[in-house]
Amino acid sequence: MKLSKKIVLAEDNSILSKLLQFKLEKEGYQLLIATNGKEAVDLIEGNEPDMILTDIMMPFISGLEVISHVRNKLEKKTPIVVFSSAGQEEMVLNAFNLGATDFMSKPFSPNELIIRIKRLLQ
Amino acid sequence: MVELLQNIVEALNNSHPIIQFCTYLSLFFIAIIILLVIYLKNLRDRLRIKGRIEATYKKKYEAELIEYLYADDDKNNNLQQQQIITYFKKSSENRLKRKLIIATFLKLKNEISGETSDAIQNLYYQTGLIDSATSKLKSKKWDTVARAIRELTLFEIKEAHDEIIQLINHPKKEVRNEIQKYLVKLFRFDGLEFLNVLENPLSEWDQIQLLEILNKFNNLEVPDMNNWLQSTNNSVLSFTLKLAKIYNQYGVKDEIIALFNHADIQIRIEAINVVAHLGIYEAVAVLKEDYFTRSLDEQIAFFKMMEEMAVPDDIPFVRDHIENENFFIRISVMKILNLITVDDDNTFKINTTATDFTIDKDLTIAS
């Protein structure tokens, strides 16, 4: 039996997380949801995900710190997609400098996100 | 115990009047503090209960909304969608629930685009929330009207345009501000039609907000600004001059030149400032002609403009002001003369060196 790919989603907007969970699970992915950066780091360390989706602004630990932790401390090459809002262009550049793979600017289309995930996990 | 109380009362009655007064005052304050503590505890309990109720409903509405959107993927699931619509419709009859439903819709709509966002907007129509918002536009309370317009803006309800535009000269500036944002966010440059009918001043902050919204849109066809540059509302003129500058509207040069004779000095100065940016060389001759009849601020603005627009033919006029009493004019004159050098044989050259920032290398090394 083929194991579904694991994705960690770090997002503090509960309803967006739920929507993405429905959409991604329908596509056959296993989604692990974290509501803040700290939970995201715990999930990443404990589950070896195939991909990480993270918002930039989150409670406790920001998305940038999550990327830094994955790239520098865990030394993993897991693809990381960053969600940014308007006015966070500087932070997106910082995210890329830290090792983010791709970014999506909010508001984004969930269908477009799925296409990007599929492409990155190929 | 009773005896002790009797003794205290007796001792109090026999004490000095000041001590009696202080004791009664202390008792009064103690009573007030006790009442306040009871009231605050009650209030906190009520807020906690309200918070719990809100959290429960929020969770419920989030689940229902996701269910609705998820069912949207399956074309055979229309019955389930219809049930959710009915549920939201019934719930929205209650004021608190309606507020929570709208907050839930917006919480997701602000984060996503495309089909899902359209589906939420569709749900907003189907649940009748749009009717509730549009009916509030007729409210006598200005804050209710402002909130309704903001809601319609967030849900991008273009159908409310005709009702909203009628309120453009509302006495409350908060309402006017919401209307302006509604029009520009949803109709972009076409929304600026309100400038034709705006009677109240458009504050500097309002202008910044509108420009910021317009700045987010690319490849827009800029509308004709001639009418706005003939407006009797000075703030409209000021805003249009900013638009002309940002969107390089050289086509309105005649209207801008006409503003050199406007009654308001601020408008005249703003018009002069736009001239240099758009490169309206015809304006130089017009301003030179009646230079001496203009105010000092206009003269300063004129020379500031000439720093970028002066041509060799202007040099004699500029040179006449090298000993002007005003410091800013003298500085501008020197900058212009420094930029354009007319030689003895009547040829000229444009000095390309950035005169302001030349560095004396020897001096730098020495220091």
Image (cartoon, coloured by chain):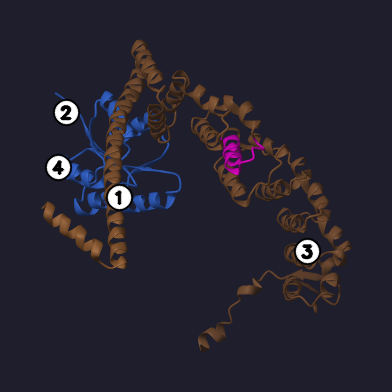
Disc ID at residue A3: 2
Q: Position of residue B168 (x, y in %)?
A: 65, 36
> Mark 2: few, some, or many residues within 10 Å (few <14, many ≥20)?
few
Query: Numbered disc 2: what chain?
Result: A
Q: CA distance from mark 1 to mark 2?
A: 30 Å
Q: Main secondary structure of the magenta part?
A: helix
The image position of residue B298, as x and y in percent, is 78, 63
Q: Which residues are magenta?
A: B168-185
Q: Secondary structure at mark 1?
A: loop
At label 1, the amino acid type is: Ser
Image chain in blue:
A
Residue flagged by tag 4: what amino acid is it? Gly
Q: Residue furthest bottom?
A: B366
Mark 1 or mark 4, whichever is nearer to me: 1
Circle 3 packing at 10 Å, graded few (<14), some (14-19), many (20+), is many
Judge depth for marks 2 and 4 and give the one in front.
4
Q: Is residue B169 magenta?
A: yes
Cβ atoms at labels 1 and 2 below 8 Å apart: no
Residue position marked by numbered label 3 in the rendering: B298
Labels 1 and 4 within one chain: yes
Residue identified by numbered label 4: A46
- Circle 1 sits on which residue? A62
Callout 3: chain: B
- Closer-to-camera residue (B297/A103): B297
